[in-house]
Amino acid sequence: MAFELAERLRRLPPYLFAELDEMKARKEKEGVKVIDFGVGDPDLPTPKHVVEEMKRAVEKVENQKYPSYAGKPEFREAVSNFYRRRKGVDVDPDNVIALIGSKEGIAHLPLAFVESGDYVLYTEPGYPVYHSSTLLAGGIPYELPLKEENGFLPDLESIPEDVARKAKIMFLNYPNNPTTAVAEMDFIKEVVDFCTDNNIILAHDAAYSEIAFDYRPRSFLEYENAMECVIEFGSLSKTYNMTGWRIGYALGNEEAVKGLLKVKTNVDSGVFNAVQDAGIAALNGDDGVIEENNRVYRERRDRLVEGLRELGFEVEKPKATFYVWLKVGMPSMEFAKNLLDKAGVLVTPGVGFGKSGEGYVRFALTRDVNVIDEALKRMEGAGVV
């Protein structure tokens, strides 16, 4: 029998990282040990005290039952305390919900507020879920190109008035994946005011908010008027090396949070309580864990940037995230395939994040310095410049 996919799925492009996995698998079948700088999955272990808390939490009978849809009060309180400590922002725990990873919340938000004919504004190059979640909700994706000459910030003045009037959500992500750009308070004020004036939910994906070197990442909720329109998505995946644990959170504007929660009550049954207990241990723990992660990523950043410059590339040191965004002067997929074929090094082609990513590739700093050195030697030996 043949079953035809729904139109909403047929409209989705192939998921970028699935394609990269296939490229890598083909090369490994040839006997090549691929050095993978593709997916942003930390190689550093989850902190030991978090793992130990999980072990204890799994044995608790009360944790083996259905969790709360919104999340345990203790987890929501931990997120609130984290924001007060790290960002100087007071958020009522009632305006915090637990997520099965921030990706889940980002994907579900349009289902709560977007109807057929509504626009969703999103930056590109960017996380593919902003675009795909809009299509799945029946909305119209509207691209906000991120260009180097604008510091990889969107040009709000370029948005037509009729689009702004019909827009329900704007997705932003700073520190930015993949460009590594950062947002200062003057831009945050500008975009919050724009969304407030146009009655748009500003959905800020803050997955990389704690990975920074020469910059203190800003929460959009720091701006005094942010609660008028901002819902911010946070993740423990990068901050605490917990990608596989699938736990994140959303907080901010009360109506936006409630709308997202209403979707969640109809499509999932919440985050496993034991994972929430582990998340509490992470959020309430010593911030030295975050600083040590940043020390490691800084060392890797410096070595990779130095090595790429020695190979003849022009590249800036990123102020935040664990990525390096490299301009390559040719089609990004062509460069990525050449690099994989000739050197056995896998990077993410920028065009996979959107058409404005063409001509760039992304390196994830999720490999040890010794592995970075090996990759640079391979690139030099293969003449990949």
Image (cartoon, grey):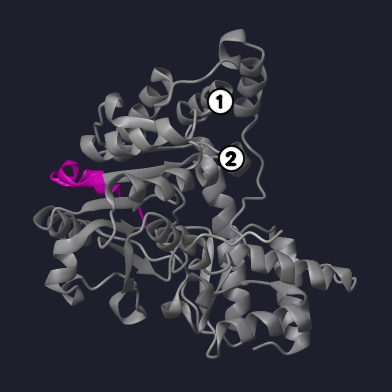
Residue 71 found in image quarter: top left
Q: Provide the residue span drawn in magenta.
A: 214-230
Residue 216 horizontal/vertical position (percent)? 35, 51
As shown in the figure, which amino acid type bears the numbered disc 2?
Met
As shown in the figure, which amino acid type bears the numbered disc 1?
Phe
SS label for mark 2: loop
Q: Which mark is in front, 2 or 1? A: 1
Q: Which residue is mark 1?
A: 272
SS label for mark 1: loop
Contact flag, marks 2 and 1 (Cβ < 8 Å)? no
**Mark 2 burial class by Cα count in 10 Å: few <14, some 14-19, many 20+:** many
Q: Residue furthest front?
A: 1
Residue 312 found in image quarter: bottom right
Viewer-nearest residue: 317 or 243: 243
Residue 200 horizontal/vertical position (percent)? 19, 54
Task: Residue 341: say if magenta.
Answer: no
Whole-number angstrom distance, CA of label 2 to CA of label 1: 14 Å
Look at 66% across and 68% down and name the residue there: 19
Residue 44 horizontal/vertical position (percent)? 65, 46
Task: State the quadrant of the C terminus.
Answer: bottom right
For the question of whether residue 93 can be seen, the reply is yes
Task: Residue 218: say if magenta.
Answer: yes
Task: State the quadrant of the N terminus.
Answer: bottom right
Point out the tag, 2 or 1, that comes first from the N-terminus.
2
Viewer-nearest residue: 109 or 190: 109
* Residue 259 in the figure: left or right of residue 7: left
Residue 24 horizontal/vertical position (percent)? 75, 68
Q: Which mark is residue 121?
A: none
Q: Which mark is residue 242?
A: 2
Considering only vertical position in the picture, is 308 above or below 58? below
